[in-house]
Image (tube, rainbow, N blue to C red):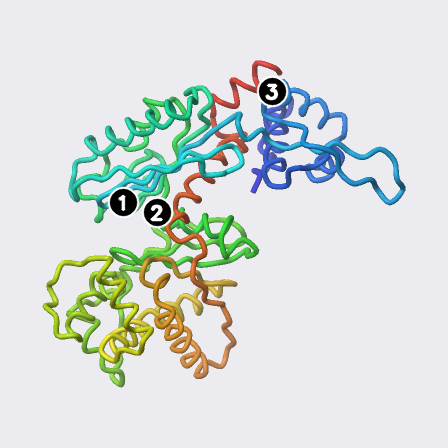
Amino acid sequence: MIPETHFIKKGDSSFLKKVNETRLLYFLYKEGPISRVDLSREAHMSKAAVSEIINRLYDAGLVLDVGKGQSTSKGGKRPTLIRLNPERGYVFGLEIKRSETIIALANIDGDLLTTSVVEYETGSPSFLVLDRVVNEMQSILQRKKISHENLIAIGIGAPGQIDYAKGNLLVADTLKNWAHEPLSEVFQRTFNVPVILENDVNTIALGEYLYGVGKNEKDLVCIAISDGIGSGIIQNQSLVKGVQGAAGEIGYIEFIRPFDRPLNFILNGHKIFGDILSEKNLFKGINKSLGVDPDTAFKRSMMSEYLSLAENQNIPVCRVLDEYAYVLGSLCLNLQKTLNPGIMILNGFVVENSPYLVDRVHHEVEESLKNIPITFRSRILVGGLKIEAGLRGAVVMALQTLFNPTQENPFLDRLVGENA
């Protein structure tokens, strides 16, 4: 959402001009192609003020004419439609994971132009990984013949608790020894653009909210399952972070074992949701049920085969997935009771590849709701963007710096300021 401007000091005309320009850029991004008349109406600005700003944006190469709109019911001249120039600016979106970093280059419209993966050994020090990632980003710009000056910003999703003031990881269980390392500073020093660092599950939630199954919702919870489990929470169209940025850390909530439901394969001595619902723990439980060595190394290909067996009603695999669905359904129900979101989005390889599991989660939640006198009806959906969700969210974060007048951005200052 576009920032409020009530904090502007009287007489601060230069800042007001920048606020107005970023407001129009925001509406062009969200609503374009759009006519100047409609843009004026949407932004609550005079036609003269809109024309003055749009002319400057034309000179900066940020805006293009894209044809004619429809005449009004009274007839008359058809309005010219304008939109952002997708080739004028670019952003990087990054997803940093335990053993790989996924890089996406996107244009000003948010279209992913290219993606690349940098792989490394689990436990690699941050300076070695970031050096390789930066080199790959520079190579991408060279291959696409894009100047550093046309780079707007960089958005990064990373596992762990974020220190937003310093732009680094405060806690990083998945990325050992990365906590307090100058993560954002490395990219800022190289590319001289704003760097927005966010928890990876929050970026997944943003991606689904703006581009995926949550794009028509104001309130949602996104549950991401991988090495552990976490959630991204959006309420009233805003990302909920909490006082220390730790909102949504549902993996640390303790699961209360029921007396009337045997869970022989899924607990494995674990007590918190993050350990119980991890992919590797599910894999271990299925191996136990099939008589395979529980300590067999986790492989996605083998997990995929197991999930396929469930679709064919393989009893040992279904037994474990039923237990898993009970625990996941319990977590979903607790989140519904606490937050009552419009939808709950399940993201991750397991839920995306097991219709049987998702159906069982729905069943467990519906059965539990029968015993509750208050109506909770949050829809539970599987994410639509899959592996792209986090990248999409990171790209959106980077693009938002272009539309936020409180964010210093050399790209905007250079293009717009020169023609002010």
Given the image, on which type of amino acid does mark 3 rest?
A: Ser
Given the image, on which type of amino acid does mark 1 rest?
A: Lys
Give the number of marks: 3
User: Disc 3 vs disc 1: which is toward the camera?
Assistant: 1
C-alpha separation, residue under disc 3 versus residue under disc 1: 41 Å
Of the numbered discs in the image, which one, if any, rests on residue 73? Answer: none
Of the numbered discs in the image, which one, if any, rests on residue 14? Answer: 3
Q: Residues within 10 Å of mark 1 (few under 14, many from 20)?
A: some
Of the numbered discs in the image, which one, if any, rests on residue 97? Answer: 1
C-alpha separation, residue under disc 2 versus residue under disc 1: 9 Å
Instruction: Judge by depth and name the residue closer to the eye, 102 or 17.
Output: 102
Q: Residues within 10 Å of mark 3 (few under 14, many from 20)?
A: few
Which sits earlier in the primary sequence, circle 2 or circle 1? 1
- Which residue was labeled with disc 2? 200
Which sits earlier in the primary sequence, circle 3 or circle 1? 3
Q: Residues within 10 Å of mark 2 (few under 14, many from 20)?
A: many
